[in-house]
């Protein structure tokens, strides 16, 4: 099919073997690429025994999946997925950078990794030359060191093997930091120091497979498209739209640290005990003036350059480097910990990224621990001497290091907020879940629902097949624009949301047609691949296991905290409405074709020709 | 130096101000679309190096005043376009031997992945597409100017050297760890 290479690379780490895998055209037509295609392949292979598959065991599959838009749609993204060690379902987690572009130029539509290597390795791809290389020298290295070492080794290798080409550039890389190596469930897959496939915890999946990195250099063109002239015009159209967003280009999400507190009152403050602050020290002007050393940073073809680079060159935070920080890291490693200064936020962000942890999940766990300390549930002794007071960046930094190295209390917190709450709760004989702000084991992004002023919705997290993932929320009606089915399209094609604000309503389908030559209408995706993927991911989430399973009547809900009235700010007293949420959840079940227990019905699955999914779900129905 | 206008016939230069590069590689996209009618980064005559994240910069021919690449070519495949100042390639003569890469102070030329002929910026016959897209986005890292009689050979440096300079400027002494 046009727009594709027509093959995926499958790597079995257990016996160091490689093979090309062809996907039937009808799968490509239905599931496009990225998240949806991975969901299809993953479910075909593992759904029949899903509950027994340990996400951190060799039987899990790990996917690196660009889509047919990757490289063409401005700002190339790649979806990283597999069975998630956070939700025990599947989370499609996309990351920016050049990886997907290089992979497509190397001749592959994606990579499937199975098994476990005997010792640390990295996968090196140069077009069709594939090799597993010893990663002994980079194992244990932080993100910045890993990037440097891989660049050096891979460029040397390219120069030796292909000497007549001229000077080789760097390959694109995805890798893990020390947290991933130690199978910390909140570890990310890193690109370019600071980019991450965050939600889902796939850094720990890489670690569990002894896979430190994947480096790829592709020397071919992007796969041929149906109408290059049209594609070119549409790229220009998308860029024109993006260029019009002057302040968005200038600040990216860096204005959020202040705005989502002061204006929308939806920012986690001290582990979501509040969602409002008016700390002018945390304004975007302060970040811009004090710490941003580069005002525009882009991935492949991106007109938006929402990324900035922060670097602190002197004083006690010296040597801290991060991007922006973007809003999520501003929030979770700022107000969420009672911190309101850009420099401390940059320091913590830089440290967290070096360790290879997720800003949202890692920051959430720090905030959770902070609240337990505030309440006297966790003591200085429990924390190996750390006095975890709100606003003490050094204390939080020390705890972060413990989490990444699974040392002391860090070993429990490394399981992520939800699992840590269960474990510490057991030790303390208390129910600690009221202090967790999570959905299906995934800490919720920094967009609360209580004020009703943010884009997050009443059932956005409760009904998402990706739990707390704020980028994959859902809403009623299921065929409306707030529905998760559209996020699935974006994560499959793949489109960067931050360059899509000004696209015309039909852009996605027209662009798809220009690339593949296949016409696509809104309803085709809505009633076809989009809905199928939703059902497949729902099935995976409900089957869950082996350590945790979700009970829809309890877990298709907001965290307890969202029902507590906001204590401060312009929306003081507001909270989510339990009855309204329950009603909407039931409506959502109905519209999604799920029964009263939230399980996709036999009829729904039969209509979508997902009988194999139905067979697996029958294990839940009986 | 003035901005190049459509009517001027004097030689041009693609001015480069590396600190303004955001790393988007639209220049490569434009170059390969224009020359190959494909998006093909490794066949682009301008290549953005990202040896250290955040220090991306475009690497392209600067048209040295003494044209060492043209002088060294054993097959006389390279010449100079007097109108634009660009290096021209006679691909029927080029063997992809790589002598011009060795002679280039910046190691700029590279071999096309499939034709195996050398790739050197041809200044798009006076209308460089890379600079056009860079301007559209407002970055202006690349811009077209009249060449005048300045020494632009200065800008032909190995990518490692440029990366080191930019990384040190951006990250201070910490940059040592990244190179």
Image (tube, rainbow, N blue to C red):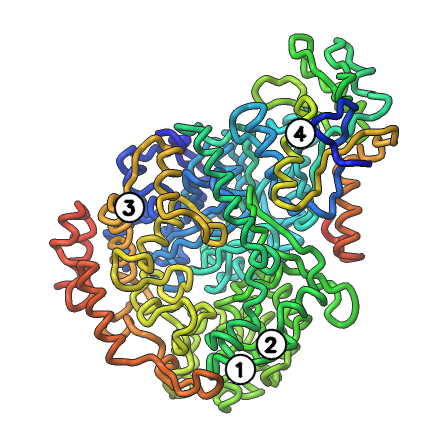
Chain letter belonging to callout 2: A
Residue found at the far bottom of this picture: A376
> What residue appears at the point 74 percent right and 32 percent down from the top-left corner?
B4
Residue identifier under label 3: A522
Please tell me if label 2 and label 1 are on a single chain.
yes
Residue identifier under label 1: A370
Among numbered discs 2 and 1, the one appearing first in the sequence: 1
Q: Tell me if residue A478 can be seen.
A: yes
Which of pointers 3 and 1 indicates the residue nearer the eye? 3
Task: Determine the secondary structure under disc 1.
Answer: helix
> What residue appears at the point 58 percent right and 23 percent down from the top-left corner?
B35
Which of pointers 3 and 2 indicates the residue nearer the eye? 3
Where residue B128 is drawn, which disc sits there? Answer: 4
For this rendering, which residue is in front, A159 or A209?
A159
Where residue A316 is drawn, which disc sits there? Answer: none
Q: Determine whether A151 is above or below B67 in the image.
A: below
Residue identifier under label 2: A396
Q: Can you give x and y, in whole percent of width and height, for residue A205 in the image?
A: 45, 55
Please tell me if label 3 and label 2 are on a single chain.
yes
Cβ–Cβ under 8 Å for marks 3 and 2: no
Distance of label 4 from label 2 (alpha carbons): 51 Å
Distance of label 1 from label 4 (alpha carbons): 56 Å
Cβ–Cβ under 8 Å for marks 3 and 1: no
For this rendering, which residue is in front, A606 or A570?
A570
Distance of label 4 from label 3 (alpha carbons): 39 Å
Distance of label 2 from label 1 (alpha carbons): 8 Å
> What residue appears at the point 68 percent right and 11 percent down from the top-left corner?
B90
Cβ–Cβ under 8 Å for marks 1 and 4: no
Task: Determine the secondary structure under disc 4.
Answer: loop
Cβ–Cβ under 8 Å for marks 2 and 1: yes
């Amino acid at each position: 099919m046009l727009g594709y290479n027509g093959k995926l690379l499958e790597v079995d780490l257990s016996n160091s073997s490689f093979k090309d895998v062809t996907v039937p055209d009808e799968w490509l037509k239905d599931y496009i690429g990225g998240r949806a295609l991975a969901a299809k392949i993953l479910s075909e292979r593992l759904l029949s025994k899903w509950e027994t598959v340990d996400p951190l065991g060799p039987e899990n599959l790990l996917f690196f999946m660009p889509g047919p838009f990757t490289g063409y749609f401005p700002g190339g993204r790649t979806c990283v997925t597999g069975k998630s060690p956070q939700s025990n379902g599947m989370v499609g987690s996309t990351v920016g950078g050049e990886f997907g572009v290089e992979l497509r130029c190397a001749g592959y539509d994606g990579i499937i990794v199975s098994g476990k290597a005997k010792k640390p390795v990295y996968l090196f791809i140069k077009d069709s030359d594939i090799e597993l290389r010893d990663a002994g020298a980079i194992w244990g290295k932080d993100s910045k060191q890993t990037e440097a070492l891989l660049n050096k080794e891979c460029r040397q290798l390219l120069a030796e093997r292909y000497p007549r080409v001229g000077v080789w550039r760097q390959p694109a890389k995805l890798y893990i930091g020390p947290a991933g190596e130690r199978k910390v469930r909140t570890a990310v897959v890193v690109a370019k120091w600071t980019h991450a496939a965050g939600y889902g915890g796939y850094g720990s999946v890489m670690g569990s497979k002894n896979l430190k990195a994947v480096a790829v250099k592709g020397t071919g063109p992007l796969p041929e498209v149906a109408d290059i002239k049209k594609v070119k015009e549409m790229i220009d159209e998308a860029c024109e739209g993006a260029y019009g967003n002057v302040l968005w280009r200038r600040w990216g999400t860096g204005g959020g640290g202040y705005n989502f507190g002061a204006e929308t009152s939806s920012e986690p403050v001290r582990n979501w005990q509040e969602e409002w602050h008016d700390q002018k020290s945390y304004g975007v002007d302060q970040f811009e003036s004090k710490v941003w050393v580069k005002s525009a940073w882009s991935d492949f073809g991106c007109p938006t350059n929402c990324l900035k680079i922060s670097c602190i060159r002197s004083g006690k935070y010296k040597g801290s480097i991060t991007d922006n920080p973007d809003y999520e890291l501003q929030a979770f490693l700022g107000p969420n910990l009672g911190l309101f200064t850009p420099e401390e936020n940059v320091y913590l962000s830089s440290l967290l990224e070096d360790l290879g942890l997720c800003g949202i999940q890692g920051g959430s766990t720090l905030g959770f621990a902070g609240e337990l300390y505030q309440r006297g549930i966790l003591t200085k002794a429990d924390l190996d001497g750390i006095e975890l007071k709100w606003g003490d960046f050094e204390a939080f930094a020390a705890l972060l290091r413990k989490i990444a190295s699974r040392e002391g209390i860090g070993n429990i917190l490394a399981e992520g907020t939800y699992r840590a709450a269960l474990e510490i709760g057991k030790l303390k004989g208390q129910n600690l879940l009221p202090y967790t702000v999570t959905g299906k084991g995934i800490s919720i992004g920094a967009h609360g629902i209580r004020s009703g002023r943010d884009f997050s919705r009443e059932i956005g997290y409760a009904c998402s097949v990706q739990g707390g993932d704020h980028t994959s929320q859902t809403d009623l009606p299921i065929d409306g624009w707030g529905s998760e089915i559209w996020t699935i399209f974006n994560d499959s094609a793949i489109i960067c949301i931050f360059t899509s604000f000004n696209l015309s309503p039909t852009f996605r389908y027209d662009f798809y047609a220009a690339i593949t030559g296949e016409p696509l209408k809104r309803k085709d995706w809505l009633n076809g691949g989009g809905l199928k993927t939703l059902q497949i991911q729902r099935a995976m989430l409900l089957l869950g296991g082996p350590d945790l399973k979700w009970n829809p009547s309890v877990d298709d809900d907001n965290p307890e905290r969202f029902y507590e009235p906001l204590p401060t700010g312009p929306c003081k007293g507001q909270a989510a409405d339990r009855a309204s949420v329950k009603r909407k959840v039931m409506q959502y079940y109905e519209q999604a074709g799920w029964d009263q227990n939230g399980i996709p019905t036999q009829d729904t699955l039969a209509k979508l020709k997902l009988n194999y999914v139905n067979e697996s779900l029958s294990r839940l129905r009986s | 130096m003035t901005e190049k206008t459509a009517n001027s016939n004097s030689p041009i230069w693609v001015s480069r101000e590396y600190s303004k590069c955001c790393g988007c590689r639209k220049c490569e996209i434009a170059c390969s679309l224009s020359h190959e009618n494909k998006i093909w980064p490794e066949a682009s005559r301008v290549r953005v190096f990202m040896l250290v994240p955040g220090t991306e910069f475009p690497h392209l021919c600067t048209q040295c005043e003494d044209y060492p690449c043209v002088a060294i070519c054993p097959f006389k495949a390279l010449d100079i376009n007097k109108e634009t100042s660009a290096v021209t390639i006679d691909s029927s003569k080029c063997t992809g031997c790589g002598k011009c890469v060795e002679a280039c102070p910046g190691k700029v030329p590279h071999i096309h992945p499939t034709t195996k002929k050398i790739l050197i910026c041809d200044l798009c016959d006076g209308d460089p597409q890379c600079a056009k897209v860079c301007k559209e986005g407002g970055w202006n890292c690349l811009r077209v100017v009249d060449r005048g009689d300045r020494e632009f050979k200065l800008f032909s440096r190995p990518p490692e050297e440029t990366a080191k300079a930019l990384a040190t400027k951006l990250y201070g002494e910490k940059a040592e760890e990244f190179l």
